[in-house]
Image (spheres, rainbow, N blue to C red):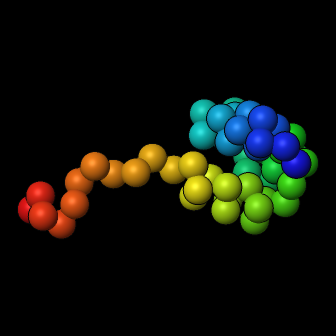
């Protein structure tokens, strides 16, 4: 599992080209590992509680 293959798999999954399981196969990892990576690469919200 390389960072490039995981990034490609995440891109394909997020664009709904592949299912999570298919993207994990492309990325060379398990679906659970891909989900974990997706959370790590998730965009961070610029909103904070102080904004409310």
Q: In the rendered image, which quarter is residue 51 located in?
A: bottom left
Along the horizontal axis of the image, is 27 left or right of 52?
Answer: right
Residue 35 picture location, percent across and down: 67, 59
Q: Which residue is drawn at 86% across and 55% down?
A: 29
Q: Which residue is drawn at 62% across and 53% down?
A: 38
Residue 16 visible here: no
Relative to the observer, which residue lies in front, 9 or 37?
37
Along the horizontal axis of the image, is 47 left or right of 7?
Answer: left
Considering the image in quadrants, where does the C terminus appear?
Answer: bottom left
Position of residue 46 relative to residue 39, above or below, is above
Q: In the rendered image, which quarter is residue 4 located in?
A: top right
Q: Residue furthest left?
A: 52
Residue 32 picture location, percent across and down: 75, 65
Residue 22 picture location, percent across and down: 82, 45
Q: In the rendered image, which quarter is residue 2 located in?
A: top right
Residue 50 visible here: yes
Residue 30 picture location, percent across and down: 84, 60
Q: Residue at x 71, y 38 (%)?
A: 7
């Amino acid at each position: 599992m390389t960072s490039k293959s995981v990034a490609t798999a995440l891109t394909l999954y997020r664009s709904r080209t592949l299912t999570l399981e298919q993207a994990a196969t492309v990325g060379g990892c398990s679906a659970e590992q891909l989900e974990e990576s997706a959370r790590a690469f998730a965009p961070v919200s610029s909103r904070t509680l102080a904004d409310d």
